[in-house]
């Protein structure tokens, strides 16, 4: 009986990989693991590699595909980020995690930065001015589109949960693809606008600010036992 009481008073067991870590570092690492961030980074890397391969092998070096394919990859990156909103612990984590909003905020910002950086790296690796191979419109639209599409995914997560949040960015990029083909000039279809279009930037950044704030405070839709 005494041994049992002693075991219970020691607190929860600490895994071997985080034993000796500061509590803050352990909390961040467990949050990253629970959101499958290593797999998400690998998927974002695949987006960058796909862009490099497309430029290097001239899959979409001219025509409408030069804009449409990178837009699709940006939406895929945003969909990957949105899926990491899913919590496997459901309501218990939300009730007990006072640092959870800060972890949500930091994770989204870090993954957005990683997505933009990896796509930009893929574009830089495939850049060949002598052969006329380069990313149409440059890197600035990548930051705008990834941010805006991620906002759509975060807003979807509030109502659908993290596992279905990928639908939002991919559906919205389809709308932007149609706007690009039809020649629409609405700022809300920011991904179809030129790099220096002020309305497109304002719409994308406003959506990102609203989506990030709402997701940080409220978090994704959850059920008591997860999804």
Image: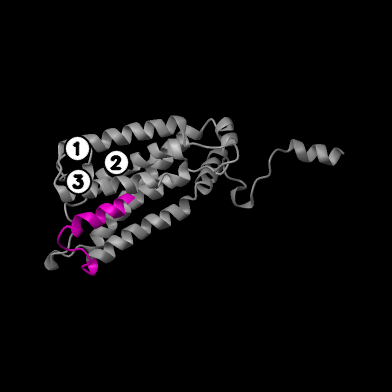
Q: Position of residue 86 (x, y in %)?
A: 49, 43
Name the N-terminal-most of marks 1 and 2.
2
Q: Which residue is mark 2?
A: 148
Residue at x 81% of width, y 37% of height: 5
Task: Tell me whether the residue at label 2 lies in contact with that at label 3, contact meaning CB atoms closer than 8 angstroms.
Answer: no
Label 2 secondary element: helix
Name the residue that disc number 1 marks.
Answer: 187
Which comes sooner in the sequence, label 2 or label 3? Answer: 2
Q: Which residues are magenta?
A: 56-75
Is the residue under label 1 in contact with that under label 3 (CB below 8 Å)? no
The answer to which of marks 3 and 1 sits earlier in the sequence is 3
Examine the structure image and report whether residue 196 is included in the region drawn in magenta. no
Q: Nearer the viewer, mark 1 or mark 2?
A: 1
Q: Main secondary structure of the magenta part?
A: helix
Residue occupying image coordinates x 40% and y 57%: 43
Q: Secondary structure at mark 3?
A: helix
**Where is residue 3 shown, x and y percent of the image?**
84, 41
Quarter where residue 69 is shown: bottom left
Query: Residue 7 occupies which quadrant of the picture?
Result: top right
Tell me if 96 is positioned left or right of 151 in this view.
right
Task: Determine whether 128 is above or below 150 in the image.
Answer: below
Front-lying residue, 140 or 156: 156
Q: Residue at x 37, y 55 (%)?
A: 44
From the viewer's perspective, is 43 left or right of 98? left
Residue 224, position as x, y percentages in the image: 59, 36
Q: CA distance from mark 2 to mark 3?
A: 16 Å
Residue 65: in magenta span: yes
The image's mark for residue 179 is 3
**Mark 3 against mark 1, which lies toward the viewer?**
3
CA distance separating discs 1 and 2? 12 Å
């Amino acid at each position: 009986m005494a041994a049992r009481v002693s075991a219970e008073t020691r607190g929860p067991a600490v895994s071997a990989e985080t034993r000796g870590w500061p509590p803050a570092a352990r909390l961040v690492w467990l949050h990253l693991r629970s959101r499958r961030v290593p797999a998400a980074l690998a998927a974002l890397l695949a987006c960058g590699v796909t862009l490099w391969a497309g430029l290097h092998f001239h899959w979409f070096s001219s025509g409408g595909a030069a804009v449409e394919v990178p837009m699709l990859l940006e939406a895929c990156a945003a969909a990957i980020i949105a899926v990491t909103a899913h919590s496997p612990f459901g309501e218990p984590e939300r009730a007990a995690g006072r640092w959870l909003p800060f972890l949500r905020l930091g994770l989204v910002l870090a993954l957005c930065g990683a997505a933009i950086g990896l796509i930009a790296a893929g574009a830089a690796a495939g850049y060949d001015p002598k052969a006329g191979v380069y990313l149409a419109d440059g890197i600035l639209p990548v930051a705008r589109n990834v941010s805006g599409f991620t906002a759509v995914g975060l807003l979807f997560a509030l109502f659908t949960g993290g596992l279905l949040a990928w639908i939002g960015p991919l559906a919205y990029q389809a709308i932007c693809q149609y706007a690009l083909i039809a020649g629409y000039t609405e700022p809300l279809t920011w991904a179809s606008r030129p790099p220096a279009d002020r309305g497109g930037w304002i719409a994308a950044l406003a959506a990102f600010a609203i989506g990030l704030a709402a997701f940080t405070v409220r978090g994704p839709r959850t059920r008591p036992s997860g999804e």
